[in-house]
Image: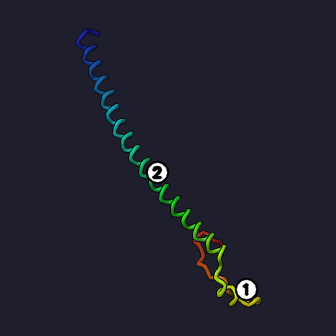
């Protein structure tokens, strides 16, 4: 191998490495953006769940007495006919 061939192969290898590095840099930038978006989504979801739990706990602690007193003992029982009819899934056996 002469000096010109060596120099040409060296330059080609350096070009390929730099292209790969540039591609990797773009991928990392996209990944950082996605990670930030996902973090924001998790934060919003967490706040929503915390709010839901807080509202439900406050309702459990202070139940509406009018609603509780309207239920008669035998009305609290649920029969099978009260269950909703759900559509069959395509995977269920018939």
- Measured as percent of width and height from the top left, residue 78 is found at 72, 85
Q: Quadrant of the N terminus?
A: top left
Q: Which residue is mark 1?
A: 76
Which labelled disc corresponds to residue 93? none
> Which residue is farthest right?
73
Give the class, few, some or many, for how many residues have Cα within 10 Å of label 2's Cα (few <14, many ≥20): few
Query: Relative to residue 24, is residue 72 drawn left or right?
Result: right
- Measured as percent of width and height from the top left, residue 36 is found at 42, 48
> Which residue is farthest left?
4
Look at the numbered disc 1 and give the secondary structure of its residue. loop
Quarter holding residue 84: bottom right
> Which residue is farthest top?
2
Q: Is residue 48 above or below residue 78?
A: above
Q: CA distance from mark 1 to mark 2?
A: 44 Å
Q: Which residue is mark 2?
A: 39
Residue 79 in view, yes or no:
no
Query: Relative to residue 21, is residue 93 drawn left or right?
Result: right
Residue for point 25% across, 9% down: 3
Residue for point 61% across, 71% down: 56
Look at the numbered disc 2 and give the secondary structure of its residue. helix
Q: Is residue 81 above or below residue 21?
A: below
Q: Nearer the viewer, residue 65 or 94?
A: 65
Query: Relative to residue 70, is residue 27 drawn left or right?
Result: left
Residue for point 23% across, 12% down: 4
Residue 68 in view, yes or no:
yes
Q: Quadrant of the C terminus?
A: bottom right
């Amino acid at each position: 191998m002469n000096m010109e061939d060596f120099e040409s192969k060296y330059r080609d290898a350096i070009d390929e490495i730099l292209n790969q590095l540039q591609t990797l840099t773009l991928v990392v930038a996209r990944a950082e953006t996605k990670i930030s978006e996902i973090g924001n989504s998790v934060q919003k979801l967490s706040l929503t769940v915390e709010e839901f739990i807080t509202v439900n706990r406050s309702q459990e602690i202070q139940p509406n007495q009018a609603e509780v007193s309207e239920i008669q003992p035998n009305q609290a029982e649920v029969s099978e006919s009260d269950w909703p009819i759900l559509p069959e899934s395509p995977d269920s056996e018939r």
